[in-house]
Image: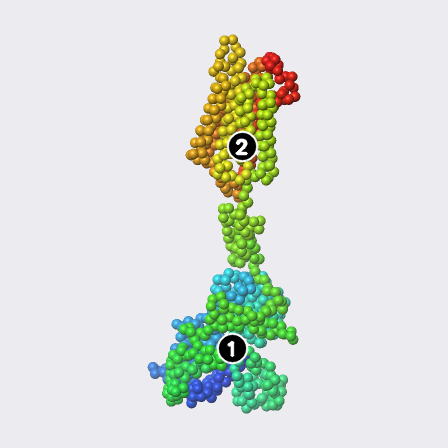
Amino acid sequence: MEMVTHKYITKPESLRCTGRIELRELQFSRAMIFAIEEINNSSNLLPGIRLGYQIHDGCSSVPMAVKVAFQLTNSLDPVFYTGNNCSQSSMVMAVVGDSASTPSISISRIIGSFNIPQVSHFATCACLSNKQQYPNFYRTIPSDHFQADALAKLVKQFGWTWIGAVRSDSDYGNNGMASFLKAAYKEGICVEYSESFNRFHPLSRIQRVADVIRRSTAVVVVAFAGLGEMRLLLEVMSREPSPLRQWIGSEAWVTHPDMLKFTFCAGAIGFGIPRSVIPGLRDFLLDLSPTKVASSPILTEFWEDAFNCSLEKTAVRDKRLCNGSEDIQKLQSPYTDTSELRITNMVYKAVYAIAHAIHNAVCQETNSTSQCDKLSRIESKQVLTHLKKVNFFQNGYHVSFDANGDPVAKYELVNWQKSTSGSPEIVTVGYYDASLPVGQEFHINKNLTWMEGRTQIPVSMCSDSCPPGTHKVLQKGKPICCYDCIPCPEGEISNATDSIDCTPCPKEFWPNAERDTCSLKPIEFLSFSEVLGIILAAFSVSGACLAVIITAVFLRHRTSPIVKANNSELSFLLLFSLTLCFLCSLTFIGAPSEWSCMLRHTAFGITFVLCISCVLGKTIVVLMAFKATLPGSNIMKWFGPLQQRMTVVSFTFIQVLICTIWLVVSPPFPMKNLTTYKDRIILECALGSALGFWAVLGYIGLLAVFCFVLAVLARKLPDNFNEAKFITFSMLIFCAVWITFIPAYVSSPGKFTVAVEIFAILASSFGLILCIFAPKCFIIIFTPEKNTKKHLMNK
């Protein structure tokens, strides 16, 4: 439109449209005429009534749209009435249009005051669904609310989370992009930039938008823009080489044939109104005789531009005079292209919707025929009332409106694919139907071609997906789609891609190396099958065998002086107890059970007390024997064999009593130790009562110290073979082992606690058996000449 500068000196000139005719808009206007003529020739719809029409060029301009709106409300009347009784004799019954949202808003606000219904074929702004502001507005094309939702689902479908966004700086672009961004946010999609522009902006503003697209890291660009703005942006971008971009387009431009000339956008995808067929329309469009063309300034301009000739004899220099050889049948232009009647069918349905509303207002159905009162005068308000209720099929296409004046949202998913000739063409590859159940609205039924003809889906992400075993940590100051992938903390897993948090494993489970699965923790205990268990068991059995062998040697030589001199009864009892000590260490090996836990500690405590009691008895016998050699001493009768036995039984009974109380009050029990190691379970015996355990050990230690003190006192007695010396050494080893056992036992982890206890049992047992019995066996076997009473009695 030509801009007018007001100087307030002279009366302003009328607004005038400039530029070339938009051929697709010309097709829309001719389709309206075709529909009206079809209705006028129909015997079923408005029989006997003819519809008239006026066609105005809105120039895609708000000032021109406002002027047209006032013309429509006043029709051809030259005077605007200012009195109370405003004349409505020439007021139109309904309006079809505009093709753009912003002019439609302006028209609706004006004609809505007069209750004139408006049915648009291409104004998709979701704002027009507001019936409080636009009560007279209806449309046959879906609202952008549905298209925005469909575009967000499309972007999500292909895993794009990092996109750029451009829009027209208009009601269509701003409202459409706002709806898209809201839907995209719900789908977890981030926008690197969102730029707006208008075709009336300076070229530098559009150049800046193009530079933002070039510099961005987002591969996918969603363009919610009008045809004029998008054409201008792509022209600017085509002047300089740009990185490849995957374009996602709104209906306004992605289905327009003229846009296919921008071949660098090949692979673009978007949603379009479903293709349609209108029988007879093509013949009507091509039925342009010279007389029809000459009688219409618009058709004249179209004809002259299409064939580059002039119908006037006063031809322009660079144009020849049209000579009648021009053949519109061979003309390839958006006007003659009826292969994809998308928006054109919306015009066709809008005209029929208004016709049905008028029909329902003035006609009555009787005996399957329509009787219409052609003389009745109806008001536009009546048409508006009946327009809300229309519900019919035309050429197989359903027409109805919901409470917001919108139809059911149905779209085709289109893709710019290269044809056999190498040029892009629009191919339908799927659909979107908002009437289907949630999750089933979107469907793709053909292969898509992406930017530069690729078959692989482009990747557009701020950060790569986090694999299982990691979780997302947002980068400071950046959108939620920009993050770092951090391995899950110890003991936690993530088994899905792009996990926000990691999940702790249950107590008895532990993550695998990849930290994406919780596996049952391995159970650990000192078993007979492992090297350490085998070694300890071998020493245990070896010690028991050694004790049995020594017992056999002593039995065979029980009458020899060295056996008799060392209290053979206590020696055999000591060997028996040492055999039990060696064997009780086997109860510590293997999986703990309720019985083994109770047996291992009590058997160990009782057998060791029996062992120490025997050693203590032997030590006391040595001391008593020395005292008995003194003149007038009668002490041995107080510590004879019976007293020795009673001493051993008494000391052992005390330990049995301690163990019984322990087992009754709080016995040891098997347990799973989950705290020592995080990655495995230790099967061990809990003490039940720590006091009971340390009482058992303390009693053993008390006897050992007492025995050690007595042995030290008797170590220098004047015998050639003084057994007290060997008992001293054995008790020294015993005490040293068990003193070092305590810190080692407390600090050893897991199964090594059991190994330390077994080692202490075996070490102290071997110390006793080697110190006390090895010298005697050596004399018996290797130096029998010393095994005489005379030798033993020597000082």
Q: Residue furthest top?
A: 631
- Dot label at residue 343: 1
- Mark 1 secondary-structure assignment: helix
Give the alpha-carbon distance from disc 1 to disc 2, as whole Å. Answer: 95 Å
Q: Would you say residue 350 is visible in this rendering?
A: no
- Packing grade of label 1 (10 A; few <14, some 14-19, many >=20) is many
- Residue beneath the point at 46% across and 86% down: 39
Q: Residue 229 at x, y = what percent?
A: 54, 72
Nearer to the camera, 394 or 3: 394
Residue type, numbered disc 1: Ile
In the depicted structure, whether residue 475 falls above or below residue 168: above
Q: Residue furthest left?
A: 84
Residue type, numbered disc 2: Cys
- Packing grade of label 2 (10 A; few <14, some 14-19, many >=20) is many
- Residue beneath the point at 51% across and 49% down: 505
Quadrant housing the C terminus:
top right
The residue that mark 2 highlights is 584
In the depicted structure, whether residue 500 falls above or below residue 326: above
Q: Residue 751 at x, y = what percent?
A: 55, 38
Nearer to the camera, 318 or 780: 780
Q: Nearer the viewer, mark 1 or mark 2?
A: 2
Q: Would you say residue 535 is visible in this rendering?
A: yes
In the depicted structure, whether residue 407 falls above or below residue 377: above
Marks 1 and 2, the one that precedes in the sequence: 1
